[in-house]
Amino acid sequence: MPGNEVIPMEAPVVIPPIPEAEERNGELGPPDEAHRGKPFPRDEVRTAGPVAKGGIRNGVRPPTEERLDDAAIEAILRVREFSLFYGQTQALKKVSLDIHPRAVTAIIGPSGCGKSTLLRSFNRMNDLIPGIRTEGEITLRDLNLRAATTDVVDLRRRIGMVFQRPNPFPKSIFDNVVFGLRMLGLRNRAELEARAEESLRRAALWEEVKDSLGRSALALSGGQQQRLCIARCLAVQPEIILMDEPTSALDPAATARIEELLIRLKANYTIVIVTHNMQQAARVSSFSAFLLNGELIEYDETIRIFTNPRVQATEDYITGRFG
Ligand SMILES: Nc1ncnc2c1ncn2[C@@H]1O[C@H](COP(=O)(O)OP(=O)(O)O)[C@@H](O)[C@H]1O
Ligand SMILES: [Mg+2]
């Protein structure tokens, strides 16, 4: 059984080649081939569910789709009527939403509303919790995540995770970055070095550590450690990066650097971030999902959520009336 850590990997799998450095919006990013699989048929995405009670959308697509181009409507991850129970406690209640590629999606809501549970469901990090039960469907492109046959190790390479507290391993900076690659069976030193540099550059850490790659990762500052964890995640070329309150243990300056990084990464990566910081959600995300007591109350473009939400509870939350 894989452990409950970042990118637990056991079986050697085919490692995609180092992507050609590709310019998109002035940023380096992975080539499209890293994003394998087919997009979902347009009509399926468009007919994503009925409008439920009180105008709350149940199967959620961006309601403002007329303002979004085709690429933005495409979903990389689809969640349909997904429920999760911890024993008798229902932590998620028939949540339906589409995660859009090459964008930052924020999951917001008061403490205990199910944000982390939902995020962890995206790469089956909840699997090891005893007494857990799920219903509904989550698909990554054409892969049914909940299927017994789904290779969880490969899934966690495709959907990486960055945690609240930076969790570098007590190893060198270099060994941290290439950890996942080694687990995948990559041994060639030159290739490991090339990939380490590439990942550290993308995580905006290279300039600070290039002369001390052999130093212990634990000697880095908190903010540097978190960027190292992002580099470690990027090294195995994930299709989606999950971040659970990635800056809540950091000071404002380190937080600002991570936020800048997220804004740069979103040109090429799909990022889902849990945050209880409303300003952060507003600054970094394109879409926001508001959860309350395990229910998805509203999901829309961030600008809409923060300027003109459809549901009173959303407005109450973003204006600080509770939570
Ligand atoms: N391992 C667990 N076992 C039992 N209940 C849990 C577990 N993890 C979370 N919960 C419960 O599920 C609900 C949602 O928790 P969580 O997803 O951590 O919320 P959030 O991240 O929004 O603060 C809470 O009521 C919490 O107490
Ligand atoms: Mg949480």
Image (cartoon, helix red, strand yellow):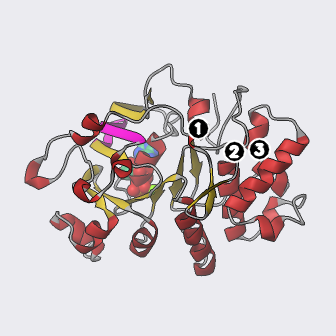
Q: Residue at x 29, y 72 (%)?
A: 306
Q: CA distance from mark 1 to mark 3?
A: 23 Å
Which type of secondary structure does the marked residue at label 3 adopt? helix
Q: Secondary structure at mark 2?
A: loop
Front disc: 1 or 3? 1
Q: Is residue 189 above or below residue 166?
A: above
Earlier residue among tags 2 and 1 = 2
Residue ID at (52%, 59%):
266
Disc 2 to disc 1: CB gap under 8 Å: yes
Pointer 1: residues within 10 angstroms few (<14), some, or many (20+)? Answer: few
Inspect the image, locate mark 2, and give the three-letter code of the amino acid beneath it: Pro
* Residue range corresponding to the magenta coloring: 76-94
Position of residue 173 measured from the top left corner of the image (x, y, whole percent) = 82, 57
Q: Which residue is mark 1?
A: 33
Q: Residue at x 50, y 54 (%)?
A: 271
Q: Is residue 199 magenta?
A: no
Q: Position of residue 15 (x, y in %)?
A: 71, 33
**Which residue is tagged 3?**
179
Ligand 2 lies under 8 Å from the Cβ of mark 3: no
Whether residue 264 is visible: yes
Of tags 3 and 2, the one toward the viewer is 2
Residue marked by disc 2: 19
Q: Residue at x 51, y 24 (%)?
A: 150
Magenta span includes 80: yes
Give the amino acid type for the residue marked by disc 3 in the picture: Phe
Residue 35 occupies which quadrant of the picture?
A: top right
Query: Is 120 rendered above or below residue 303?
Result: above
Taking the image as shown, residue 41 lies to the left or right of residue 275, namely left
- Would residue 171 be visible to someone looking at this image? no
Label 2 CA crowd tier, 10 Å (few <14, some 14–19, many 20+) = some
Is residue 225 positioned above or below 83 on the image?
below
